[in-house]
Amino acid sequence: MIKLRDISKYYKTGFGRIYVLRYIDLDIEEGEFLSIMGPSGAGKSTLLHIIGMLDTASEGEYYFEDQEVHKLHEKHRTRLHQLNIGFVFQSYHLIDNLTVYENLETPLLYKKVKTSERKGLVAEMLDRFHIVAKKDLFPDQLSGGQQQLVAVARAIIMKPRLILADEPTGNLNSEQGNEIMELLKRLNQEGTTILQVTHSKEKAAYGNRIIHLLDGRIEKEE
């Protein structure tokens, strides 16, 4: 599904380059649940953002289903992202002045989904995540766990083939965190490819493969 070859990310300074990622080679098969671990500053989130097409590599080649992402114009990259990838962030990234219903509806509006289909998809997510009673509430009226449930629901409403989760349980208590991880596990069992960044060995163990980053390089796999 995904092939990275010699992916590097650096920032130029007056004294040369500061590398965030160095020569990453990585293959991700469809249906995998991959965890990325490493200390702060190891390059985990940068790697996730490059795979999610929210950022671009400075060097190297990125193939998504044989498409040469590293050669695509920004508009085509964005379209490829919208059609295939859902993102879940640690800080939820819900829109504060929109209700739960409106937050779920937003990605469908961007993709010009018809009104009747939008209503059906939002209703399906509200039911699946047991948040029907919360649909008219705003994010600041929800607990952290409820906000993250809404964020996951929004990420999967267009049925993406790949979900990228950046510390998805970092702001949650253990019970809420386990609920989110079990949900990601179920999505993976249903066929969605999952790629998560985590500091937690316990959460990483939900994956069927763990990549350890150190100083922008893949240190080891397990």
Image (cartoon, helix red, strand yellow):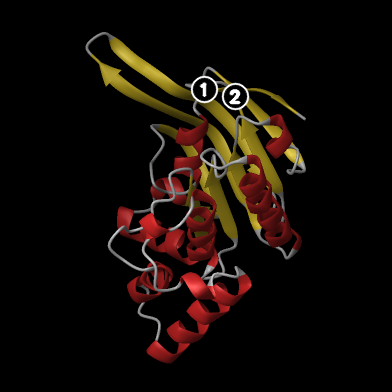
Q: Residues within 10 Å of mark 1 (few under 14, many from 20)?
A: some
Look at label 1 and name its amino acid.
Answer: Ala
In the image, what residue occupies the spot 52% across and 17% down?
215
Residue 144 location, x and y as percent? Answer: 49, 49
Q: Is residue 120 above or below residue 6?
A: below
Residue 99, image quadrant: bottom left
For label 2, the SS is loop
In the image, what residue occupies the spot 47% across and 70% down?
134
Q: Residues within 10 Å of mark 2 (few under 14, many from 20)?
A: many
In the image, what residue occupies the spot 39% across and 63% down?
79
Residue 159 is labelled as: none
Which residue matches tag 1?
42
Residue 172 location, x and y as percent? Answer: 55, 42
In front of the other: 219 or 136: 136
In front of the other: 108 or 103: 103
Residue 198, image quadrant: top right
For label 1, the SS is loop
Residue 222, image quadrant: top right
Which residue matches tag 2?
38
In the image, what residue occupies the spot 43% across and 44% down?
91
- The answer to whether the residues at label 2 and label 1 have Cβ atoms under 8 Å apart is yes
Residue 219 location, x and y as percent? Answer: 65, 20
Cα separation between marks 2 and 1: 6 Å
Q: Is residue 187 above or below residue 126?
A: above
In front of the other: 53 or 88: 88
Instruction: Residue at the far top: name it.
Output: 15
Look at label 2 and name its amino acid.
Answer: Gly
Q: From this viewpoint, is residue 90 visible?
A: yes
Q: Is residue 101 left or right of residue 192?
A: left
Q: Is residue 207 above or below residue 95?
A: above
Residue 165 location, x and y as percent? Answer: 55, 47
